[in-house]
Each structure stands twice: as structure tokens, then as C-alpha cells.
Amino acid sequence: MGIYFNKGIQTSESFIVGSLLALSGGYLDTYTFFGRGEVFANAQTGNMVLVAINIAQKNYHEIWKYLIPIFSFLLGVLISEYIRYVAKDKKYHHRQYVLLLEIFVLCIVSFIKRDNLSNIIANSLVSFVCALQVESFRKMHSTSFASTMCTGNLRTASENLFYFISFKDRKYRDIAIRSFSIIIIFIIGAVIGTVITLQFKQISILFVNIFLIITFLFMNREHL
């Protein structure tokens, strides 16, 4: 169990927090894909490719569907850093303020109707939330970590698996296991998101706030 739980790790970088955020990350991707016009809120690389494809096919009217969420993601990173800067010496840790902002924005999304124009707005807000999260929560057990996408976690897991096989150092084994675990949890979040989104459509995004509220309360024990 020491692989996952370590008293020397601050709460915001713990495996529990990482797992809750990974669940929310997987959920959000399937929400925007199945509920908001097949756009990925987290995977901006995919959206960039879709922009390029539509430019090549001269479908210029379609590029805004993917381009606006990309710019929203950029804005989310900027706002996350601004919160970190202004939240020094405040009641809560800056990551908790980020979680509260995420919860608020996702509540707004639940009221946005489903049509082509409204979906662009909703997807942009979800991309904004994903950027807030990935920028604010970047480490787990002092190792690089991403809660809203799997590519970096897969690289970290594979790299440390190689190091463990090569050097037999348990430190690398533990990092690999945690990283692979987070990928599995992300997939579980995506499965949950698919089932609930297909059932509850627009308002299904409110279920993500359950994970975020639990994360906030868990972090509130230490304000970290």
C-alpha cells in the first residue's frame, strides 16, 4: 500500500487526489464527445489535427468548432497561473480555489442547451476547466502527472518500467505502477462518463462535480 499512500506526500499530490482528478478527466472527454458534438475537451492535440484536416478539406466553417476550445484551454492555463499568484497567504491553497472555479463553470455548462453553436460554448468551457486542472495539478508523489490526458502518464509509466527492469530499483517500479494505475482509472472515468452521458445528456456533466467536491473536501484537511 505504500506505493499508493505515503504520509510524506502533501494531499494535493497524493494518489487519492490524482485518482479523483483522473476519473473527472476521463469523464469530461466522453461528455464532450458523446454529448457535445464529438469534440475532445482534454486532447487539444486531437483538436489541432481536426483543425488541420478541415483546412485541408476547405471546410473552413468547421474549424471554429475545434479552434475555440483550443484558445479556451490556453486561457485556462493563464487563469490557473493567475490564481496561483494571487492566492498566496489566502485561507485555502490555490489548487482548492481552482477546484471551486471548476465546479462553478461545470454547473454553468449543465444549463447550456445542445445545438451546434451552444456546443461550441460548452466545449470551450469544459476545455477551460481541463486546462485549469492540468496546469494546477501537475505532480503525483513528486512525479510528473496529468489528470486530463494519458499520453504523458503512459510515457512516465513506460520509462520507469524500463528503468526498473534495467536497474531493479523499486522507486522506478512504484512510479510505473502508480502511472499505469492512473491510466486505468482515467479509462474507468471515461466508461462512467459514456454511460451517464448517453443516459442524462446535457446535465450529466454535474456528476463530475461529485469527484471535484470530494477532492476539495479531502484537500481541506491540510489546505494542500
Image: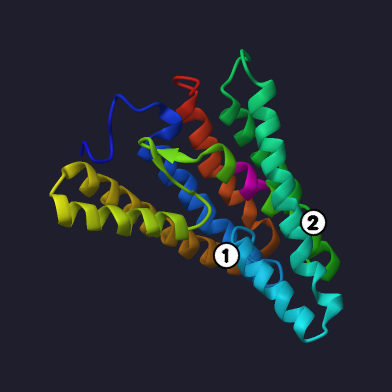
The residue located at (80%, 72%) in the rendering is 63
Quadrant location, the N terminus: top left
| Image marks 1 and 2: residues in contact by CB distance under 8 Å | no
Q: Position of residue 202 (x, y in %)?
A: 70, 61
Q: Residue at x 62, y 49 (%)?
A: 130
Element type at marker 2?
loop
Q: Which mark is residue 110?
A: none
- The answer to which image quadrant residue 53 occupies is bottom right
* Residue 182 falls within the magenta-colored stretch: no
Residue ID at (19%, 52%): 164
Residue 118 is situated, as x and y percent measured from the top left of the image, at 83, 62
Residue 23, compared with residue 3, is above or below; it is below
Q: Is residue 106 left or right of residue 9?
A: right
Q: Nearer the viewer, mark 1 or mark 2?
A: 1
160 or 197, nearer to the observer:
160
Residue under the image location 69 percent in, 74 percent down: 50
The residues colored magenta run 129-133
CA separation in Å, label 1 and label 2: 17 Å
Q: Per the image, is 131 magenta?
A: yes
Q: Position of residue 21 (x, y in %)?
A: 49, 45
> What kind of element bears circle 1?
helix
Q: Amino acid at mark 2?
A: Ile
Q: Quadrant of residue 132?
A: top right
Label 1 amino acid? Answer: Thr
Asked whether the viewer can see residue 125, the reply is: no
Residue that numbered label 2 is attached to: 112
Mark drawn on residue 30: 1
Residue 28: give x, y in percent of width and height. 59, 57
